[in-house]
Amino acid sequence: MAPDRASAPSAPFARLAGLDRERVETRLDGLVERNRFAIAVVFPVTGAALLLASARGWLPDPLAFNPLLVLVGVCVMRLPLVAGLAPLLDRRAALGVALVTAYAYAVEYVGVTTGEPYGPFEYGVSLGPMVEGVPVGLPVFFLPLVLNSYLLCLLLLGDRARLWFVRIPVVVATVVAIDLVLDPGAVALGFWRYFEGVAFYGVPWSNYRGWVLSAAVAVVSASQPSSGRAWSRPTGSTCRPGRGGPKSDAGVTV
């Protein structure tokens, strides 16, 4: 007897329903592993060349600072971080990420409309779709800066990272140090501009005070303990944990 077509799920939905979290993580690992050279070298070099060419007026308007190219390129380069953190995310950790994302949108909106806490500024280039002057893709720019700094400090501090009064100031200082390089570069390329107090390569000191606040809020949120997985590498292991046992690291060490 033929199966009832009305009750049988279509093939694509059946395949989707059969994908559990571990299989998705494994496939993402494989994707990053197979394309690690493109992610780590081709996309950054190509992106840098396109940005410089755009800033110098060498590209026609459809390509110069193309928002879609910028957003897609950044998302691709974030894949190793996503693959590395995916097995560590439980509900509580996901809630922490959601809170940091909400904070990123909120503080950016306040910054665009009031000039606080970073100082008055405006975007010179659309970083993808914009809503009320805020990039929709803001989390792919904000979260990796904080999370990569956090993970780097966990790696370098070792057991001392368990002490919040050591971990939080070090991570905040790392975020601000990275922004000391990123923000002047973004201003030079025309991504955004400040209206006053251009003390450090076109960037006011108020911007870095704002980043101390934003980094502290984000790091405190990221430091909340998770119920199942820890935001740290297991002792004595070079593999990252997964529900099916250790998995090989796909591009980042957690």
Image: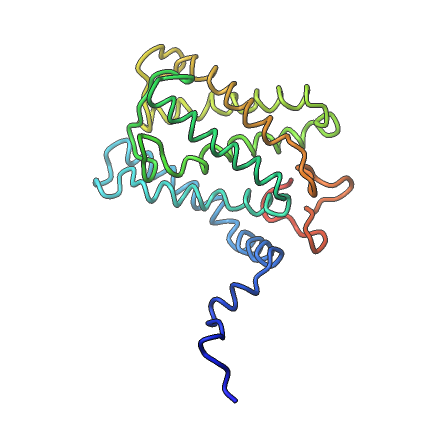
Asked if 211 appears above or below 99 in the picture, the reply is: above
> Whole-percent x and y of residue 76?
45, 46
Horizontal side, residue 186 vs residue 158: left or right: left
| Residue plotted at (54% across, 64% down) | 17
The residue positioned farthest toward the left in the image shown: 60
Q: Is residue 166 above or below residue 136?
A: above
Q: Taking 23 as reference, is 134 left or right?
A: left
Which quadrant of the view contains residue 109? top left
Residue at 78% in and 41% down: 236
Q: Quadrant of the C terminus?
A: top right
Total marks in image: 0
**In front here: 175 or 93?**
93
The residue at 66%/31% (across/down) is 154
Task: Report the colour scheme.
Answer: rainbow
Which residue is outermost to the bottom?
1
Residue 51 image point, x, y percent: 33, 36
Where is 17 relative to 136, above or below? Answer: below
Side of 135 where 222 appears, left or right: right
Q: Is residue 44 above or below residue 152?
A: below
- Which of 211 and 35 lies nearest the eye of the viewer? 211
Viewer-proximal residue among 221 and 68: 221
Q: What x and y, as percent, mark residue 188?
A: 34, 24
Q: What is the residue that sits farthest to the right in this orientation?
A: 236
